[in-house]
Image (spheres, coloured by chain):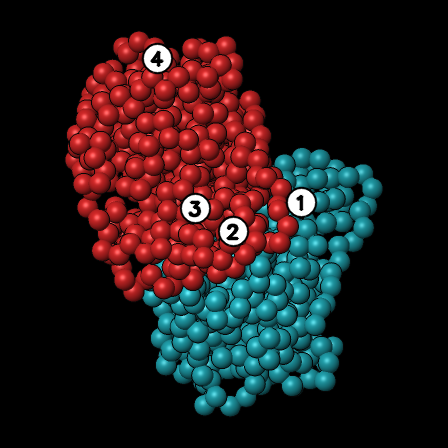
Chain colours: A cyan, B red
Amino acid sequence: MNPVELIKKKRDGKILTESEIEFLVSNLTKGKIPDYQFSAFLMAGFLNGLNKQETAALTRSMLYSGKVIDLSSIPGIKVDKHSTGGIGDKTSLILAPIVAAAGIKVPMISGRGLGHTGGTLDKLESIPGFRTDLNLSEYKNVIRKCGAVLIGQTKEIAPADKLIYALRDVTATVESIPFITASIMSKKLAEGIDGLVLDIKTGSGAFMKKMEDSKKLALSLINTAKAFDKKVIGFITDMNQPLGNYIGNWLEIYESVKVLQGEKVEDLLEVTLNLSGAMIFLGGKAKSIKEGIEISKKMIANGKAFEIFLKMVQLQGGNISLLKQPEKYPKSKIHEKLFADGNGFLESTDNYEIGMASLELGAGRMTMADKIDMKAGIIFYPKIGDRIKKGDLIAELFTDKKEKVDEVKKKLLSSIKLSQTRPAQVKLIKSMLT
Amino acid sequence: MNPVELIKKKRDGKILTESEIEFLVSNLTKGKIPDYQFSAFLMAGFLNGLNKQETAALTRSMLYSGKVIDLSSIPGIKVDKHSTGGIGDKTSLILAPIVAAAGIKVPMISGRGLGHTGGTLDKLESIPGFRTDLNLSEYKNVIRKCGAVLIGQTKEIAPADKLIYALRDVTATVESIPFITASIMSKKLAEGIDGLVLDIKTGSGAFMKKMEDSKKLALSLINTAKAFDKKVIGFITDMNQPLGNYIGNWLEIYESVKVLQGEKVEDLLEVTLNLSGAMIFLGGKAKSIKEGIEISKKMIANGKAFEIFLKMVQLQGGNISLLKQPEKYPKSKIHEKLFADGNGFLESTDNYEIGMASLELGAGRMTMADKIDMKAGIIFYPKIGDRIKKGDLIAELFTDKKEKVDEVKKKLLSSIKLSQTRPAQVKLIKSMLT
């Protein structure tokens, strides 16, 4: 096979065979196809698209560029969840122990935050000592002992994904549904899962801002999961405002612990319970998602979920005393409050700007080389539809960067839009697809 | 400026500004934009196209990536010709001395053969001693002394074109009219010309097989020449059969010399005289192309064109005694004749296959690293419309590769199609555009 002929085929809008895609990906991984050829293929694929079969083939060749973890020695059905990420999205931290408490194994390989959204790994690393860089035998050990594990992508897993993502990032070929699908699924399928629940965010704080695109991505992910004979359920959920109130790494751990201890953070709970309910259903421990939700609630109420969370943190090296006594966590130099400057109903927030505000306080990174301030972030109180009076507490800011405070306050105030009539309530679960 | 943003802009079908294109090309040339980014831009440009202004901007930035030769110290108007190449296309060798004899300077920078078509440089180098690698001062010296010069692309000229062409070649982005235009024009404009005549070949032996594509390329080249205030005339000429009868490097020199000495090779003369006539017209030495053609004929008849050809060869180091006594040129080991195996009128030839047959005998190269046998090639006699009888001489083969002879004979016989009714005559000059 000749790479130029394959690039030409995709350039001319033709369909590549599985072995042709495998040829391109495996030779890129071996360093036998140079970056400049693969990037021409990426742009041709970006513009001419990849069909279902090509997307599955791309996923397969990226998946088998590395190790596929075999969890068959661990009893039980393995189910994971993937979210496309959003502001304050801490559902993984809450649902992994819930689902594990219900008797399903949750082998989670997560990512880091970049730009306006945070990453589960960064959040967990705000717990002193917590290790996300477990090797495969440690990974298996944690899941065997407590039913859930949360680590980062290892070198063994889908090395082609790392190469291809790095290339997409610098060649303007990121926002492609087939490429996004293959990147997500090659890593998820490497975990050794039987089933997968997808949380595709939509709205101003999401990667996909339009419902139409979110639906396309959801369907592409679902089709690909099915091509690998995995059980799958996809949710499209709202990301037009932060999920829960806490944004920032330690702040999100804090809120997750409170929810696991029984605190009712409504919107966060609604999304989390739907996802965990679906996971329990896919794992065969409930006859429906609804029953899965009831089981989930029980696992919080009886304390089992929080117990598993503590056990998992401990097994991964984290200091659990801070989870029990969060008041002992290091404090930001600046803790500032922001008050409403007008009256009305909260009509909308520019959720992307809220994410960026948190990043500017130190909670995120613009490039993978940036360092994160684990304490930094925002508690953002109002929800769309809430009545706001001038002087109401809107947000609390935590940062060591004094110089950023005024700018961030301004950004936050201008990111909220008030109206004089009460807006329609936000539907959190916009769609469920199978 | 950020290269990713510029790639994205072209990816999304937007129009790049002149400074944006200049940024991409100049930074590629400086090694500051990596190949993998530029190749993504090339694929985006291939698929989404470049408009007139972008094509001119690309040409300009490639042109100014190197030296633009200043011929203002040499009196007279400078006019060149560019052909997109074809089988037996030796017009440059004949028209350069004709036009120089008419008092116009012809500064020609030519290319090498690749695949089914030959290159002017290779043909000239079949003359022992002929140097195509003159430096700029030698180049000016030859043109000053004899009015014409024929050299290869130097390092100083359009280095960005070399980089970009190498990248297009391995990323399936060759067949793009804007990129072809910029590649041709950046080199031609670097020669220091005032006017340019274009010979866009169309048909089975041409790069552009369809009239429609040839017209598009012709218009793109003409528009770009005009954007640089150059006088320009474009011809679309037939390439459905070899031009003249001789195909191969020395064989084409031989036929060119015969034409310069007055031999009437009809089709070759018709195309050559139209091109030289247009050059003489653009150079201001004739009031019309028609008058230019008459002057051209005179320059052959009075021996001035051949005289200039000999002088140019001599100035460029070539042995002119072989041009006067071609029987002394080294002979191929094998000289074989091919006879017709049927009766009828020649309806069509697969001209691409004739070019490939000559290549297989040793006259061409598949990659730039291959070595050429200067003696090798084919004399192909019949023209479309000719009556052929079984046993008629169709072709003569010259080669040192005994093992190729049978295969090439078969290829040649199957490349000609006979019919029982006389086909319409081929119109050589299909269109003239300004």
Measure the alpha-carbon separation of dots 3 and 2: 11 Å
Q: Which residue occupies 56% across, 74% down?
A: A80
Looking at the figure, which quarter contains the N terminus of chain B? top left
Looking at the figure, which quarter contains the C terminus of chain B? top right
Q: Amino acid at mark 1?
A: Thr
Q: Badge 4 is on which residue?
A: B103
Q: Which residue occupies 27% across, 36% down?
A: B124
Q: Amino acid at mark 2?
A: Ile
Instruction: Report in which chain the residue with disc 3 lies.
Output: B
SS of the residue at dot 2? Answer: strand
Label 2 CA crowd tier, 10 Å (few <14, some 14–19, many 20+): many
Instruction: Report in which chain the residue with disc 4 lies.
Output: B
Q: Which of disc 2 and disc 3 is earlier in sequence?
A: 3
The reply to whether callout 3 and callout 2 are in contact (CB within 8 Å) is no
Q: Which of disc 4 and disc 3 is earlier in sequence?
A: 4
Q: Nearer the viewer, mark 1 or mark 3?
A: 3
Q: Residue B388 shows which numbered tag? A: 2
The reply to whether callout 1 and callout 4 are in contact (CB within 8 Å) is no
Q: Badge 3 is on which residue?
A: B381
Q: Nearer the viewer, mark 3 or mark 2?
A: 2
Examine the image and state in which quarter residue B252 appears: top left
Q: Nearer the viewer, mark 3 or mark 4?
A: 3
Q: Badge 1 is on which residue?
A: A349
Residue B136 vertical position relative to residue A370 in the rendered view, above or below: above
SS of the residue at dot 3? Answer: loop
